[in-house]
Amino acid sequence: MLELLGFISYLITLYTYVIIASVILSWLMAFGVINAYNPFIRSLWQGINAVTEPLLRPIRDALPNMGGLDISPIILLLACYFVQSVVLPNIAKLVV
């Protein structure tokens, strides 16, 4: 069971990297640093969005409209860190 919790923690870490990559890629596309019409960039963007949007969309719906500022990735990262540092260790204590 502890190995499963370690694997879940690893997956959460990997997911946080994907969220950070999504934010950086969106900034690069918004400021015109990379071409959004490049087929590789477009497929990379669609892949990252397919992974992150199912969790970011409910957060965006719950937040008030803040204009051009999107803090939903920050809230999702905080939730991931909370699960990783509070929830998983407490589950590990219950198992042992």
Image (cartoon, helix red, strand yellow):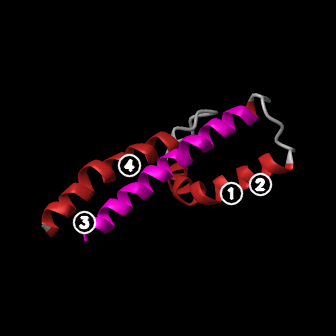
Spatial separation of the CA atoms under disc 3 and disc 2:
36 Å
Contact between labelled residues 2 and 4, with CB atoms less than 8 Å apart: no
Spatial separation of the CA atoms under disc 4 and disc 3:
21 Å
- Who's the residue at 87% across and 44% down the image? 37
Please tell me whether mark 1 sits on a helix, a strand or a loop. helix
Residue type, mark 3 in image: Leu
Residue 23 showing in the rendered view:
yes
Q: Position of residue 14 (x, y in %)?
A: 48, 52
In the depicted view, which residue is nearer to us: 48 or 60? 48
Residue type, mark 1 in image: Gly
Contact between labelled residues 2 and 1, with CB atoms less than 8 Å apart: yes
Please tell me whether mark 3 sits on a helix, a strand or a loop. helix
Identify the residue position indicated by label 2 in the image: 43
Q: Vertically, is 89 above or below 1?
A: above
Identify the residue position indicated by label 4 in the image: 79
Queried whether the magenta region covers residue 22, the answer comes back as yes
The number of numbered discs placed on residues in the rendered structure image is 4
Q: Nearer the viewer, mark 4 or mark 3?
A: 3
Boundaries of the magenta span: 1-29
Spatial separation of the CA atoms under disc 4 and disc 2:
27 Å
- Who's the residue at 81% across and 49% down the image? 40
Contact between labelled residues 4 and 1, with CB atoms less than 8 Å apart: no
Q: Position of residue 27 (x, y in %)?
A: 67, 33
Identify the residue position indicated by label 1 in the image: 47
Upstream in the sequence, badge 1 or badge 4?
1
